[in-house]
Amino acid sequence: MATSRLRLLLLSISSMLFVSSSYSLSEPQTLLKFKASLTNAAKLSWEKNSKPPCDAHRSNWVGVVCMNSSVLGLQLEDMGLSGTINVNALSGFPNLKSLSFMNNSFRGSMPDFRKLKELKSLYLSKNQFSGDIPANAFEGLIKMMKLYLSGNKFTGEVPSSVLDLPKLKEIKLDGNRFSGRIPDFKQTTLQVVNLSNNALEGSIPQSLGKMDATMFSGNKGLCGAPLKTKCDSRPSPTSPVPRPPSSSTRAPPPEPLVPSIWIIMIIFIVGGLVVFSILTVLLMGRRRTETPPTEEAPPPRTQKSETVKLCFLMGERERFDLTVLLKSSAEVLGSGSFGASFKAAIPTGPTMVVKRFQQMNNAGKEEFHAHLKSLGRIRHNNLLPIIAYFYRRDEKLLVTDFLHNGSLAVRLHGHESVGQPPLDWPTRLSIVKGVTKGLEHLYREQPGLVAPHGNLKSSNVLLDDSLHPLLTDYSLTPIINQETAQQHMLAYKSPEFIKTRRITKKTDVWSLGLLILEILTAKPPENYRGNDDDQDLAMWVRSIVGDDPEDHASKIDVILDKDMGEIREGDRKVIVDLLEIGLSCCDLDTDKRLDLKEAAERIEGLKVEDDK
Ligand SMILES: *[C@@H]1O[C@H](CO)[C@@H](O)[C@H](O)[C@H]1NC(C)=O
Ligand SMILES: *[C@@H]1O[C@H](CO)[C@@H](O)[C@H](O)[C@H]1NC(C)=O
Ligand SMILES: *[C@@H]1O[C@H](CO)[C@@H](O)[C@H](O)[C@H]1NC(C)=O
């Protein structure tokens, strides 16, 4: 079909343009660009004006592997690194053969390494990566010999593209949550295929029948050689993935929009060069509308949700179509824990953010619409409203306004890299007050929710032009899948959830407390979460200032963010008070922890020196 050929062409043009865009940087520049997207990279003493990274085979920069005076690989292990692995920057090394990030703290979904065509070994073991790995994640990496993903939190099926790596020798996927059946590896080069400690099921393919049995142990559902468990002789299901329940009893025709949105989103994450994919959306949209509705005969109930029509929640806002929104220049903002988000504008209107949520199947359709309607009624100066949303069973998008000043997280932890000035004390205090007011309003408006925000953290606090805070991604717990919620939402990282598997009305208060401490110290709380999730930023702060409030004033300088600048004596007292409130909000014992009302009253009572 002509449109799909055109679409492929556009996709390949966009990826070509994109790959060639970063070749012009020098090796030091490329390394520094790569470092800039890491957090907690203090151990990486890479400097702009030092010796070149590589002299012949000798490396002058920590963790850089050299060959013939050029960068051959990176070996950044055991460094506590987190943040983003900027593959785009790495594509500036044309000979990059080996990458190791083992035993760090990287989180989120599998980065897309497909641009690094020379890669022979990739070691990502012992991080916190999570989520499904797209089937095509390793497509085209034909030189790959060693792939280590052990000890992460990956879910879903073993990505099928590993079957097409002709030189693969060692693949270690042990210690994850992979499920489904083991794909049929055919490579004769294979020596290690460690799949132990996952949730795989079905019979072990014959090609692996002579491997060491320890590579399959710890999967309850596996059977066949080399394991001792015999397979049931009944025919096993042919489809490895259980199909979601369908609304009709006949096998439903494939829904045309799903794969295209997938492709587009992958491009978003990979590329950033979105204009072409936007065109693709348009093409797909047009193709669909050209299709006579009878051709695929979908049941009438689902037909309505097949269109790209948005549901609007704000009556006063101009209506637009998703395709119109995406037609203008769009730009990737990032891939958050729930999915990608991107920035787009209607030609005559404001810039908006479209966020994709893949994991929102907790509620049925009616419930989903009802919950979004209830969110649409919430209006408050400190809550970013949802303008519109898009619903399909397998695809949900939320549209909000775009705020140019970005998030509090960036302002606290990366303001230098984006060229913003740091926040002074009066601004920090007013942000704390605004956040608290927004949270109080959510408690009033969503009394049915145990944690009315559920995911209060600095990346969900956006700043408007006058640095006034607006909370976002609030009250989504009822519609987010339980498992995803537990993986990604802050409420489920709270001490009480870890201990008792319960969240309480004070769980959001704990998040507020952490946020206060983060604002005072500029330390990202996720870096203080221990391996067993039993530690937090509050414990670190307490370990320094001690338990006795009398001592806090004298010890507070050690933990305060230096970027706050000179602190006046009058303000210091207020800062110590705010620190006390923050610590009380983080009390592990929920009985002793402040409730929101108390915390809000005490926060409201704080004043900067000038306005006393
Ligand atoms: C390094 O240089 C030598 C001699 O110039 C060459 O034979 C070898 O293939 C080069 N190695 C790499 C990895 O480029
Ligand atoms: C992992 O890295 C940490 C430092 O971040 C180090 O203390 C620890 O020993 C390392 N673990 C292993 C098994 O190497
Ligand atoms: C496979 O990984 C497990 C740890 O998850 C380990 O105990 C086992 O020895 C490994 N097997 C081989 C053959 O490497």
Image (cartoon, rainbow, N blue to C red):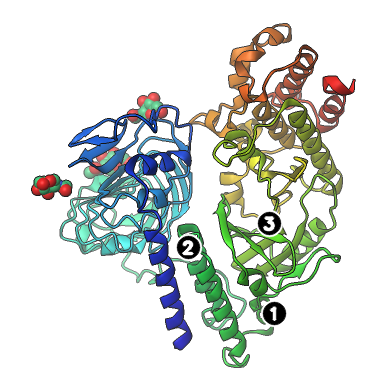
Mark 3 or 2, which is nearer the eye? Answer: 2
Residue that badge 3 annotates: 479
Where is residue 325 drawn, in percent x and y? 66, 69
Q: Quadrant of residue 533?
A: top right
- Secondary structure of the residue carrying tag 2 is helix
Image height of 336 relative to 257, above or below: above
Image position of 285 (left or right of 448): left
For the residue pair 132 and 19, the one nearer the viewer reads as: 19
Could you say which disc has been placed on residue 62 in the image? none
Q: Is mark 2 within 8 Å of ligand 3?
A: no
Q: Spot the residue most to the right.
A: 612
Distance, label 1 to label 2, CA atoms, is 26 Å
Q: In which quarter of the image is residue 562?
A: top right
Quadrant occupied by the N terminus: bottom left
Could you say which disc has been placed on residue 266 in the image? 2
For the residue pair 559 and 348, the one nearer the viewer reads as: 348
Where is residue 389 drawn, in percent x and y? 71, 65
The amino acid on which the numbered mark 2 sits, given as a three-letter code, is: Ile
Image position of 149 (left or right of 153): left
Specify whether residue 339 is in view: no
Residue density around tag 3, few if under 14, some if 14–19, many if 20 or more, within 10 Å: some
Whether the residues at callouts 3 and 2 have beta carbons within 8 Å, the answer is no
For the residue pair 234 and 43, the one nearer the viewer reads as: 43
Q: How many marks?
A: 3
For the residue pair 234 and 305, the one nearer the viewer reads as: 305
- Secondary structure of the residue carrying tag 1 is helix
Whether the residues at callouts 1 and 3 have beta carbons within 8 Å, the answer is no
Which residue is at a point 58% across and 78% down the rendered structure image?
Answer: 282
Could you say which disc has been placed on residue 304 in the image? 1
Mark 1 or 2, which is nearer the eye? Answer: 2
